[in-house]
């Protein structure tokens, strides 16, 4: 299996964390392509990272699909529950974690541009999404486990991205239960071995 790597991408981190949690990270090779590389666009018309190429040569994108594929490889316990309420909860948490990343990553680019009214409104809207998601996670923090599902991994990667890119907007204030949960899971191999780097 070959994967596009970026030390700063929370989506790549999510895929790597899944591979580590399932004990198959040693089977991943660095595809060595950047978003501007025409070879990536040939594999993935969206030219997005992460992109994973299976041993059969199938290109998969983006992180939810890649993580589900990685969950099908090997014999370790599954990160995607098979059915019922546990599955829907895991997928809901994944959507919440991905949503935090989706609202945070493009907002970072917008901050450095001239701040007209439209851009300021966009930034405020995206920040509000993150704040509401954090409040929801705080309310559910007692139910979060030890990175046993895709949802918990996505949420942890999202919080790590906020630490990495938004140190001037600390998320821990007002979220003590979420802070306590994150302090426990950030030391687990799936997160400890995938700390973001610029």
Image: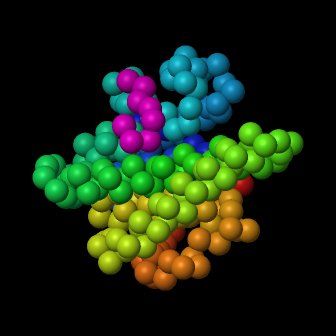
The relative height of residue 19 versus residue 56 in the rendered view (above or below) is below
Please tell me which residue lies in front, 53 or 88. Answer: 88
Colour scheme shown: rainbow
Residue 145 % position (x, y): 31, 72
Give the percent coordinates (x, y) of residue 149: 30, 59
Residue 148 included in the magenta stretch of the image: no
Q: In percent of the image, x 68 and y 62: which residue is there? A: 166
Is residue 63 magenta-colored?
Answer: yes
Farthest residue, direction left:
84
Residue 191: give x, y in percent of width and height.
48, 65
Viewport quadrant of the N terminus: top left
Which of these two is toward me, 173 or 24?
173
Q: Which span is picked out in magenta?
A: 58-65
Residue positioned 42% across, 26% down in the render: 59
Quadrant of the rendered image containing residue 143: bottom left
Q: In which quarter of the image is residue 128?
A: bottom right
Residue drawn where x is 35% and y is 66% of the image: 147
- Relative height, residue 63 to residue 84 (above, below): above
Q: Is residue 27 left or right of residue 120?
A: left
In the rendered image, is residue 189 in sight? no
Residue found at the far front of this picture: 117
Q: Is residue 55 visible?
A: yes
Q: Is residue 61 above or below residue 86?
A: above
Decide if residue 148 is on the left or right side of residue 11: left
Q: In this view, does 191 lie above or below 69?
A: below
Q: Point out residue 140 in the picture as x, y percentages from the top left corner.
A: 34, 71
Identify the residue shown where x is 65% and y is 33%: 34
């Amino acid at each position: 299996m070959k994967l596009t790597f970026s030390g700063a991408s929370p989506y790549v981190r999510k895929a790597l964390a899944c591979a580590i949690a399932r004990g198959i990270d040693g089977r991943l090779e660095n595809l060595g392509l950047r978003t501007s590389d025409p070879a990536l666009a040939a594999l993935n018309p969206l030219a997005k990272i992460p992109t994973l190429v299976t041993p059969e040569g199938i290109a998969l994108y983006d992180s939810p699909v890649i993580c589900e594929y990685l969950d099908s490889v090997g014999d370790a316990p599954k990160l995607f529950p098979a059915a019922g309420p546990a599955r829907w909860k895991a997928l809901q948490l994944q959507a919440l974690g991905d949503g935090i990343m989706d609202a945070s990553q493009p907002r970072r680019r917008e901050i450095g541009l001239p701040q007209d009214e439209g851009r300021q409104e966009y930034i405020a809207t995206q920040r509000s999404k993150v704040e509401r998601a954090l409040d929801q996670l705080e309310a559910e923090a007692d139910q979060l486990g030890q990175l046993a599902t895709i949802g918990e991994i996505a949420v942890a990667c999202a919080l790590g991205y906020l630490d990495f890119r938004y140190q001037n907007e600390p998320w821990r204030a007002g979220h003590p239960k979420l802070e306590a949960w994150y302090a426990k899971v950030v030391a687990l191999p799936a997160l400890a071995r995938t700390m973001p780097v610029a």
